[in-house]
Image (cartoon, grey):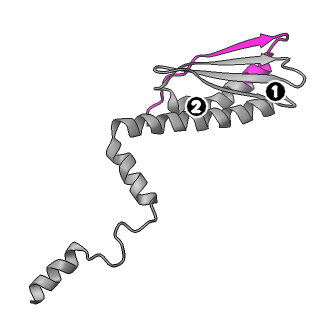
Amino acid sequence: MTDSPEVPIEFKGRHDQITERMQEHATRKLRRLARYGDALTRIEVVAEHAHESPEIELIAHQTRGAPLVAKDRGESFSSTIDLLVDKMEAQLRKAKERRKDHKHPEVREERERATDRVSPLPADEETYEDVVRKTLDD
């Protein structure tokens, strides 16, 4: 597997500074999003009151489409970043599936058929195989 190029990460602090240690922790956690690097151009981390009850916003700018946003408030910077990375990963995964299904509609149809639990034929209707067997037996 080839290493994708690093996605640039920008840190912005409102009403407070984001320390070097906080930036390192966030960068380490945001590396998980590197597998979506082909779709990402940059990631912004905006923290308001970073040291006590921080409200953090992750903004993932994509090559196409609107940016994805995840926002939450937590007790500490590190726990909030961990939660937001999980949220952003789910959004990126969903966006990737949408792109995949858009290009290959037959995959989406096959997936829908596989999850459909209703029998395609009513119980009293004969299948093609049944008709052929009757014809051959006669």
**Quarter location, residue 57:** top right
Residue under the image location 36 percent in, 66 percent down: 120
Q: Secondary structure at mark 2?
A: helix
Rendered location of residue 35, percent (x, y): 52, 33
Residue hosting label 2: 33
In the image, which residues are magenta?
A: 1-24
| Extreme residue toward the right, this view | 52
Q: Residues within 10 Å of mark 1 (few under 14, many from 20)?
A: many
Which residue occupies 63% across, 32% down? Answer: 88
Image height of 104 relative to 81, above or below: below
Question: Residue sitting at 78 percent across and 31 percent down?
Answer: 80
Q: Where, by quadrant of the figure, is residue 128 drawn? A: bottom left
* Other residues around mark 2 within 10 Å, as few (<14) / some (14–19) / many (≥20): some
Q: On the image, numbered disc 1 is attached to which residue? A: 77
Task: Establish if 27 lies above or below 102.
Answer: above
Q: Which mark is residue 27?
A: none
Amino acid type, label 2: Leu
Could you tell me if the residues under marks 2 and 1 are in contact, i.e. CB atoms within 8 Å?
A: no
Quarter of the image where the C terminus is located: bottom left
Q: What is the x, y in percent for residue 63? A: 47, 19
Residue drawn at x 55%, y 29% as measured from the top left: 34
